[in-house]
Image (tube, rainbow, N blue to C red):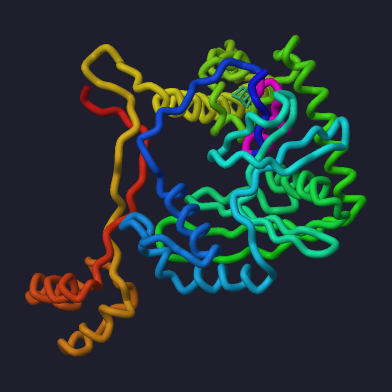
Amino acid sequence: MKRITASSLQRYMECPASAVLPAYSHHNDGASVGTLLHEWVEGYLNGAPPVPSPEIEQWARSPYLLAALDEILEMGAPNTEVKFAGNPMAGEAQALQTLGQRDYSEAPQDWICGTADIVIRHPDSVTVIDLKTGYTDPPPANRNWQLKFLAWAASRAYGVTEASIGILRVWSGGDSAALLPLVKLHELDLDLIQDALANLQADLSEAEHAPDAYLSTGPQCRFCDSLPFCPAVKAEVSALGEEVDLSTDDGAAEAWRRLETVEAIAKRARQALERRAVFKPIPLGDGRVVAEVDKEGRESIDGAVAIPILRELGIQPPVSLSKTAIKKAAKKNYDAVMARLAKAGAIKPGRKYKKVEVVDG
Ligand code: SF4
């Protein structure tokens, strides 16, 4: 079985089979924004933030992120990138000493491993904080199995009976960030987490011999590397309806239920195929290819910079600061006004994102 890591626990809890099915390995295009930000935050908390690269400058200057980091520093001396390994069935866990990023080779293969972004040790407890970037919100701390495992492993490794877990959330598409409220875990909570993880370990070893019995489709499929090989998704995507008699209430009701099912299947099929195209573009055989492409959203206008300039130019700032609204307000001076706003840095580029779509091959 592949190494069980904390970052996949959320999905394994829903679908143990995803731990044992074949999986696509990710291609890596170099350091992502998330990785760069993790390194910068680590440096900041250790008193030596590196010069931020252009990709993360907006957050390195963000008053929201700086306030959240100072809040963390006030809790005590933080350790960053702390690796833990644990065997919940045996009730054992330890902090690993290996230096390499995500190097868990020191731990037995059947132990669960994970890296805590930020750990603060207190006399009788430990605080574990995970830095989460991106557009998709992670599960909240009290339902987050990555954090629960790390809290359990840290408490066992350090011999304490209480832990607090929290998420340092950095949202993409701006400079917003916050330390979300911490969740306190008492001794009984940590024992229950150990029991749930031990049950998962048992399910995972059973799933190795009978994966089909441990398959469960749902939102977790979206980020599953095994999706292209998954028999459950394949069955859903291949499902076909049969004829029904719409002249009877029963037949129409059956048709309606089937419509709901088909819509759900179609949604899942799209997700499955989009995920498949991310792993490997799909040539359609007619010159078109389904592939992930880079996109850029619409530019936005920074009101704090733009409004004083518009007033200075004698233009009543519109309620909504869109280009269309400014065009309406500025009339024939539109081009000159936009040039002035651009020069002052009031026009922010649209956010960059990736999207799967059909493109010419
Ligand atoms: S695609 Fe969904 S059902 Fe299939 S293995 Fe992954 S999580 Fe499980």
The residues colored magenta run 7-19
Q: Which residue is rendered at x = 56% and y = 59% of the image?
A: 169
Give 134 or 282, whichever is nearer the viewer. 134
Tell me which secondary structure the magenta stretch mostly adopts.
helix
Query: Is there any visible trace of residue 172 in the rendered image?
Result: yes
Give 315 or 55, whichever is nearer the viewer. 55
Give 298 or 161, whichever is nearer the viewer. 161
Q: Which residue is rendered at x = 21% and y = 25% of the image?
A: 360
Residue 326 sits in which quadrant? bottom left
Q: Which residue is rendered at x = 55% and y = 22% of the image?
A: 227
Q: Is residue 284 above or below residue 274?
A: above
Q: Is residue 247 left or right of residue 324?
A: right
Quarter holding ligand 1: top right
Q: Is residue 29 left or right of residue 37?
A: left
Residue 291 placement (x, y as % from top left): 33, 27
Q: Is residue 144 left or right of residue 186?
A: left
Is-magenta flag for residue 57?
A: no
Residue 128 sits in which quadrant? bottom right
Q: Is residue 215 above or below residue 124?
A: above
